[in-house]
Every structure is written in structure tokens, then in C-alpha cells.
Image: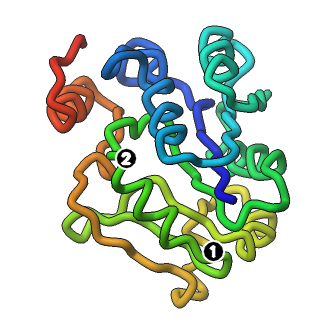
Amino acid sequence: MIGAVVLAAGASRRMGREKILLPFGRSTVLETVLETLAAARVDEVVVVTRPDLPAAIEKARGLGARVVENPDPHAQMLVSVRLGIERVSAGAAAVFIWPADHPAVRLETIDLLARSADPAAALVPSYRGQRGHPALIGRGLLPGIAAIPADEGLRRLWRSRPELLRQIEVEDRGVTLNLDTPETYREAFQEQDLDPEF
């Protein structure tokens, strides 16, 4: 069993609009991520979002995800990660940690990571040497997330123990495209052979 935590609580600073609700593909950024996970047959999905995003909450629930509201969306992303993994079933061998502002990741990449899941390792996709998202964290590493200092990120898991990290090289530029600017939004559309609407 594979689970996923989709991080959709962060505020949009440079996009001018709520980026997880921007059009992408046939739907929105958030829905695209959830549809990719469904197509990859990921067993359980938890979306961590802000309480002030009722449209995102409705879309996530409509696609079968469990929703967790982060009451402090300005906190470090690690807070959202912890809230999400607390809601994933204990039977999950590994859990995707997927920031929702990376919607251009291909289904084949998710399939490859899921087939390579290891309860004792963290798998990170890499495009031409650049690490990206989503990470797939083995069940055995999840308890260690609670011990990470609040001002640090998931990388702390493997900084002290690099043998826990497996970098998976993929021909998928989408793993590195974070929709932080209108430019990266357009680039993500181009990766999907779509016309941007921003």
C-alpha cells in the first residue's frame, strides 16, 4: 500500500492568485496532482490545505482525498507534512510527499517511484541531476520526521544518513517545475503540451 500527502496549504505570493486553483490541463493545479495519484493507483491520499480555501477542500474531497486543515499556513512546510502523515494509515509501506504546486509531474514518474518503494529509504526523482518532487518516504523513516527541528525540512532525514536517500533519475522536467512565477507556470504548461491561461 502506498499513501500520499499533498501539500496545498502554502500561500501564493508571486502569482497574484491562489496557485493550486489555477487552471491546469483539464482542471486545476490541485486536481491535476490528485488525478495523477489516482491514475497511479495510490491507495490513500491526504490533502493538507488552509481553512480559508473552501474551493480546494471541496475539490479534494470530490476526488476522494482526506482533507486536513492547517490552522497555521504561514508555518514551515514541515508542519503540513507532519499533519498529513499523521492521517496516513499505518499499513502504508511508503508515502509520497507532494507539494501541489508541482503539477507537471508525469504519471510514468509516479509509477516508477511507486514500483521502487522501499520502507527503509527515501526516493527522490531527479531531472538531469537536479532533485525534484515528489519524494517517496519509506514507512520506516516517517517517525524521524517528528524529530526534525521546525526550521528545517525533510532533507534533514538523509543529511546525517545519506545512505537512506535514493535519487531516481527521470526524463521528466515536471519534477523540478515549481509554479512560483507566471514564467514557471507557462513552462509547466509547455511540458504538458498545453496552452497557458495565465
Q: Where residue 39 appears, x then y in whole percent? A: 47, 40
Callout 2: SS: helix
Question: Residue tagged by mark 1?
Answer: 157
In this rendering, the count of numbered labels is 2
**Spot occupied by residue 112 in the image (x, y as percentages of width and height):** 40, 63
Name the residue: 45% across, 38% down: 36
x and y percentages locating residue 105 in the rendered image: 35, 45
The quarter of the rendered structure image containing the C terminus is top left
Left or right: where does residue 23 sit relative to residue 195? Answer: right
Identify the disc placed on residue 107. Answer: 2
Amino acid carrying label 1: it is Leu
Q: Residue at x 56, y 71 (%)?
A: 117
Whether 10 is drawn above or below 131: the answer is: above
Front in this rendered view, residue 76 or 142: 142
Q: Amino acid at mark 2?
A: Leu
User: Badge 1: few (under 14), some or many (20 or more) residues near its Cα, within 10 Å?
Assistant: many
Quarter of the image containing the N terminus? bottom right
Q: Nearer the viewer, residue 78 or 37?
A: 37
On the question of residue 118 being in view, the answer is yes
Looking at the image, which is closer to me, 44 or 70? 44
Percent x, y of residue 31: 49, 24
Disc 2 versus disc 1: nearer the observer: 2
